[in-house]
Image (cartoon, helix red, strand yellow):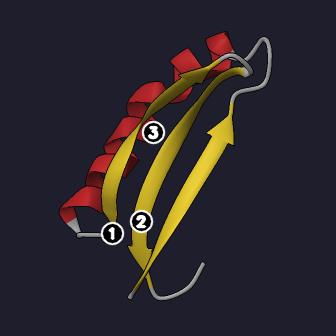
Amino acid sequence: MALFAVVYAYPAGSEAPRDTHRPAHRAYLGELADRGHLLVSGPLSNPAGEGGLLVLRADSA
């Protein structure tokens, strides 16, 4: 299996929808981690805005 990094930025004004969906998002990431697909995940903060990083193990992108 290959490793893939997913880097993403949150659009302006997306705080409320992210808060709504965060519990399901974290549960799904937990399932991926339990199956050995998600190696690392977490928030990113930089001058251009906030976002996130996922490092995944998978057969293809």
Q: Which residue is labeled 1 in the image?
A: 37
Q: Residues within 10 Å of mark 3 (few under 14, many from 20)?
A: few
Residue at image location 54% in from the left, 36% down from the top: 52
Residue 13 disc label: none
Give the number of the mark in front: 3 or 2.
2
Label 1 or label 3, whichever comes before in sequence order: 3
Give the number of the mark in front: 1 or 3.
1
The alpha-carbon separation of the residues under discs 1 and 3 comes to 15 Å
Q: Residues within 10 Å of mark 1 (few under 14, many from 20)?
A: some
Identified by mark 1, the residue type is His
Q: Which residue is labeled 2 in the image?
A: 56
Q: What element does badge 1 sit on?
A: loop
> How far from the left and from the top, in percent, is residue 13?
78, 11
Q: Quadrant of residue 11?
A: top right
Q: Residue furthest left?
A: 34
Q: Quadrant of residue 34?
A: bottom left
Left or right for 11, reference 33 = right
Residue at image location 33% in from the left, 69% down from the top: 37
Up-down relation of residue 52 to residue 21 (above or below):
below
> How far from the left and from the top, in percent, is residue 42?
40, 36
Left or right for 21, reference 34 = right
Q: Residue furthest front?
A: 47
Residue at image location 47% in from the left, 88% down from the top: 59
Q: Residue furthest right?
A: 12
Q: Which residue is labeled 3 in the image?
A: 25
